[in-house]
Image (spheres, coloured by chain):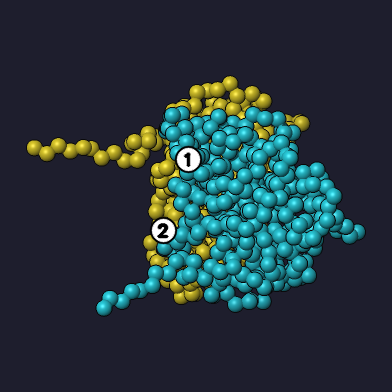
Chain colours: A cyan, B yellow
């Protein structure tokens, strides 16, 4: 009689289960050492009272540009009816349940460690960004259903001690659907759910014709973009895969919301006015703010589009 | 009689030959359009006189931290006996043959385009950085002989229109040897040539034990580091592969010079004083400055270590 060895998925093997309660590190070799200097974000376990500073954080929002994230922080203060205590500035907004921060691509792991040291629980992560759309009117908001790489693979590869490990880049479908339900049906732009292609390269990785290097034709480019579009890709950007893979692996719910700045089917360079782009970039911010307000039970007479 | 199809290397197929004379783009689909907005570095072909601003650039130096690169720019003004014209600040140092700039990982391609528009020729690129060393006294300067990825592969992979293309990450052995010859034999630290491992991940990619994720033991870590060390890897950082691959493909001579901030065989966290690190970070800067001075024929009575 044949015996079967049960096949375990990467998630089962690695224990990728959602976390509830105080965030635990997924590190078999790390004991809670006396100090832990989070070098890149200028905080440390010994030098700062991380629990006092961050323990009530429930939402973490990442975005690419420092200016954009600063204006988002200012916007959130209003959206949450948050009273800034005297002597505090926006750096202290973590006390208001929401932490707005600027990542480099890999900073999310440092934030996980920080939230662990601060004994936070049930945190949701958002990435708010810009992207190139495929076959969509510029200014459309895409809530990412699944992040895939340039070969449409739904995982991030990390070379680890000589092995190439694959970490699934899953996002929370519940958060995505709830965000979609919060979109203003009367807005003059669309908000949709779709797949997002994430590339490591700004030019060739995205089939652009205007990079320093390009060894393909315009016809090659269009054929490729049509093929990925036919497979459900709605936009292209550069952070969602890593963001989704790290959050999923940590057991943290996460969502990616990006506005499109152009239709990549029509061209490679952005040709709308700076003020228009500024307004478009606020669309993901307003949507995520509406979600956070709802979950914090903050009433508002204004719709998410009119603050 | 058998006939043989000659096997072409990736370099031959892609025409990876050193460039002399005005830098040409390696783009078959880009005609010199009227305008080209270099969005991320806030310059454009139409909005700026790029030829006037940058045509005499011969050396481009990249580094990771804005503060470090600012202090390097100030240092270069002295090292080159450069007289700052009234009304100019360090942003104008491009007129002094050397351009010091802060990259994100991918900005080098934008600098290539800029140098093309400015009709620069015979430019050499340097990356000056920090790294973790293997079996070396902290503060050692490593001139990279070859950049390899986390699986010791000497190329960068870019998913391009559905194909995973491999771009060799070669550096100039001539520039490396010349840099080594310029190292001060009386300095109280070593300067050596060796292989550099470049990872996409700060924690697991570098076999650290102190990340949020870790599913290996200290013994696994040490076994891995010993194995790569035995194969000539002297240090680990996060930019050399991409930098080397883009420069080699563009036909531009390049070198990577990094100081080590710790011995990764001994631990994962840096535990020397900030002022010590500041001094160590100047070591690659002084070496590259000596190279540039020599090539510009700038005499100096002071050694490269005493400015």
Q: Is residue A66 left or right of residue A136?
A: right
Task: Where is residue A118? Give x, y as percent.
Answer: 71, 70
Which residue is at 17% across, 38% downward? B4
Label 1 close to label 2 by CB (< 8 Å)? no
Between residues A186 and A53, which one lies in front from this camera angle?
A186
Up-down relation of residue B239 to residue B46 (above or below) = below
Task: Where is residue B99? Give x, y as percent.
Answer: 61, 37
Task: Where is residue A228? Give x, y as percent.
Answer: 47, 41
Which residue is at 79% across, 47% downward? A303
Between residues A175 and B206, which one lies in front from this camera angle?
A175
> What residue would you read off at disc 2?
B151
Q: Is residue B165 left or right of residue B187?
A: left
| Chain letter of the residue beneath label 1 in the structure image | A
For residue B42, what is the image quadrant? Answer: top right
- Is residue B26 among the parts visible in the rendering? no
Up-down relation of residue B249 to residue B138 (above or below) = above
Measure the C-alpha gap from mark 1 to mark 2: 34 Å
Between residues B206 and A228, which one lies in front from this camera angle?
A228
> What residue would you read off at disc 1?
A230
| Chain letter of the residue beneath label 2 in the structure image | B
Q: Which mark is residue B128?
A: none
For residue B249, what is the image quadrant? Answer: top left
* Residue ranking furthest to the right: A86
Which residue is at 67% across, 76% downward? A34
Where is the N terminus of chain A found, in terms of image quarters? bottom left
Q: Residues within 10 Å of mark 2 (few under 14, many from 20)?
A: some
């Amino acid at each position: 009689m044949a015996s079967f060895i049960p096949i375990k998925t990467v998630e089962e093997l690695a224990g990728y289960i959602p976390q509830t309660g105080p965030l635990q590190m997924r590190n078999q070799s790390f004991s809670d050492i006396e100090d832990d200097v989070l070098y890149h974000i200028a905080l440390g376990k010994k030098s700062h009272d991380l629990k006092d500073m961050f323990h009530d954080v429930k939402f973490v929002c990442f975005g690419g540009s420092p200016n954009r994230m600063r204006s988002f922080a200012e916007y959130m203060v209003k959206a949450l009816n948050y009273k800034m205590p005297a002597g505090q500035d926006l750096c202290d907004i973590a006390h208001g349940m929401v932490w707005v921060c600027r990542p480099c691509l890999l900073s999310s792991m440092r934030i996980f460690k920080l939230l662990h040291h601060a004994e936070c629980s049930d945190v949701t992560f958002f990435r708010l960004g810009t992207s190139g759309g495929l076959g969509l009117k510029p200014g459309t908001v895409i809530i990412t259903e699944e992040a895939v790489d340039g070969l449409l693979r739904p995982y991030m590869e990390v070379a680890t001690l000589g092995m190439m490990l694959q970490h699934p880049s899953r996002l929370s479908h519940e958060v995505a659907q709830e965000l979609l339900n919060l979109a203003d049906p009367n807005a003059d732009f669309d908000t949709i759910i779709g797949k997002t292609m994430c590339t490591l390269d700004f030019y060739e990785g995205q089939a652009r014709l205007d990079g320093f290097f390009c060894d393909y034709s315009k016809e090659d480019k269009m054929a490729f973009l049509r093929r990925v579009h036919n497979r459900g890709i709605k936009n292209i950007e550069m952070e969602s895969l890593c963001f989704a893979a790290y959050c999923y692996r940590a057991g943290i719910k996460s969502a990616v919301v990006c506005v499109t700045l152009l239709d990549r089917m029509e061209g490679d360079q952005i040709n709308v006015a700076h003020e228009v782009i500024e307004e478009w970039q606020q669309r993901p911010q307003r949507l995520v703010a509406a979600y956070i307000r709802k979950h914090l039970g903050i009433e508002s007479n204004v719709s998410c589009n009119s603050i």
